[in-house]
Amino acid sequence: LSPSIAVMTNIDREHMEAYGSYAELQQAFVDFANKVPFYGAVVASADDAELSAVLPRLTRRLITYGLDAGQADLRARDVVLADVEVIGLPVEAASFPATTRADLGLPDDVPILLQAGIFHHNKRIDAVVEAFAELRRTRPAYLVLAGRPGGLSIADVEALLVAHEVTDAVVFDDPSDEVLAALRAHADVALALREPCLEGASYSLLESLVSGLPVVTVDDGRPGPKRGLKA
């Protein structure tokens, strides 16, 4: 992209699998902004600390804006939002035929932890397996990994399990929506340890919450209340 005017609102740790490191992600923003021609401009939020940190590296005309930043070129004050309607995400619990744990090849007598979603590095499957192995040292539990390859192959996932001596976990390769719904119905806890980001929550996380399943997830470290997530 080579825009005449580039608008940047924030930098967040999203799509890290495409960049490799946070420094490379920051540089991508800088490179994008510096593609603006000499007659154009970069419009950037001064409220976002991560974005503000890279603004000195820009070589194009810069206009900053914000609500909180005192040094912004443009500041909004006394903002009033009237007649705002909040519409929830269209996430519904999928229906599935009546099943038992035995039908799915799962044990009846231990808590089941479910990791569902694409098998990718930024989903932190490695952290899930490592944490589960630590948990198993103090209490019985059973791990289910359900997803399709997307950066990590099934062999990669199985190798992680072997490396941490989690030999009785079950891996569902590209399960159907019905199977995923059944797994959520029989699981005790869902796991969602993806890299923190602001652009959107994991759809698998939302589906677990809609199903009434408690979710263990990561705290992105930002201030403010955490709603809807159970740990």
Image (spheres, helix red, strand yellow):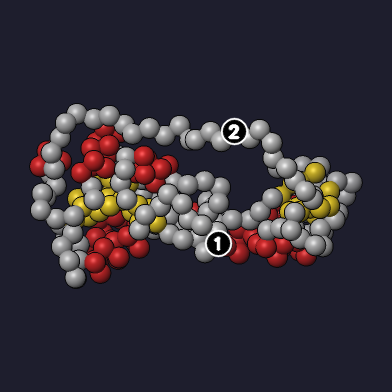
Left or right, 216 with respect to 79, comes to left
Residue ID at (11%, 50%): 107
Left or right, 196 with respect to 103, comes to right
Q: Which mark is residue 85?
A: 2
Residue ID at (25%, 69%): 134
Upstream in sequence: badge 1 or badge 2: 2
| Element carrying mark 1 | loop
**Looking at the picture, how far across and down is residue 194, in whole percent?**
43, 55
Residue 2 in the image: above or below residue 14: above
Q: Marks 1 and 2: which is nearer the front? A: 2
Mark 1 and mark 2: Cα distance apart in space: 25 Å
Q: Nearer the viewer, residue 183 or 5?
A: 183
**Looking at the picture, how far across and down is residue 29, in whole percent?**
68, 55
Q: Nearer the viewer, residue 5 or 32?
A: 5
Q: Nearer the viewer, residue 174 or 204?
A: 204
User: Which of the 4 image quadrants contains residue 160?
Assistant: bottom left
Residue 202 in the image: above or below residue 21: above
Residue ID at (14%, 47%): 106
Q: Considering the image in quadrants, where does the N terminus appear?
A: top right
Q: Residues within 10 Å of mark 1 (few under 14, many from 20)?
A: few
| Extreme residue toward the right, this view | 39
| Element carrying mark 2 | loop
Residue 71 in the image: above or below residue 97: below
Mark yes or no: residue 218 visible.
Answer: yes
What kind of residue is marked 2? Glu
Mark yes or no: residue 18 visible.
Answer: no
User: Which of the 4 image quadrants contains residue 140?
Assistant: bottom left
**Looking at the picture, how far across and down is residue 171, in whole percent?**
23, 48
Give the residue at mark 1: 222
What kind of residue is marked 1? Arg
